[in-house]
Amino acid sequence: MFHSLSDHCKGFEISVQAFRRGKERDELDDGPRRFDIIVNISRGASSESGKSEMFGVPEQEPFNSPIDATRVGIEYAWAIIDKKVEGESVDEL
């Protein structure tokens, strides 16, 4: 199961997908879950240039909901755009 969300920042379009991992044996059925979060950043509307870059969000603590996971993805994308994440850049877009 995954949750998708999009946003805009400084002329970039941001798309986030949060994929919920399967429940571990020792986890409660309704407890927090880990998510794999993927961020896709493109310049302007996705149909304009066709160039985009995909980034994986580093491992996070478990989240109570997919909305919390996608929110972290949006914040990570903003940090990349603002050049606050070492080794990640959208300068080529």
Image: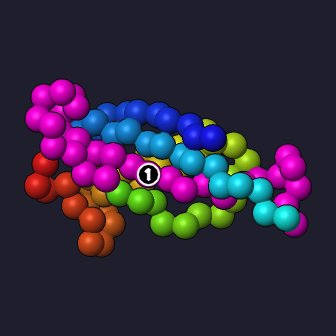
Q: How is the image coloured?
A: rainbow
The three-letter code of the residue at mark 1 reads Ile
When the figure is inspected, residue 61 is found, relative to residue 73, above or below; the finding is: below
In the image, is residue 7 part of the stretch drawn in magenta? no
- SS assignment at label 1: strand
| Residue 90 appears left or right of 28 | left
Q: Residues within 10 Å of mark 1 (few under 14, many from 20)?
A: many
Residue 87 visible in rendering: yes
Quarter location, residue 48: top left
Quadrant location of the N terminus in the rendered image: top right
Q: Residue at 22% of width from left, 61% of height from top? A: 89
Instruction: Please indicate whether residue 10 sits to the left or right of residue 39 in the image.
Output: left
* Residue beneath the point at 27% across and 55% down: 82
Indicate the quadrant where residue 60 lies. Answer: bottom right
Vertically, is 38 above or below 89? above
Q: Position of residue 40 (x, y in %)?
A: 33, 46
Q: Residue furthest bottom?
A: 86
Q: Is residue 91 left or right of residue 83?
A: left
The residue sitting at 39% across, 49% down in the picture is: 39
Q: Which residue is mark 1?
A: 38
| Image: magenta residue range | 26-54
Q: Is residue 38 above or below residue 66?
A: below
Q: Is residue 75 visible?
A: no
Task: Say which residue appears at 28% left-offset and 36% top-offset.
Answer: 13
Image location of residue 71, percent across then percent down? 53, 44
Q: How many marks?
A: 1
Task: Check residue 32 for magenta coloring.
Answer: yes
- In depth, the one of 82 and 58 nearer the eye is 58
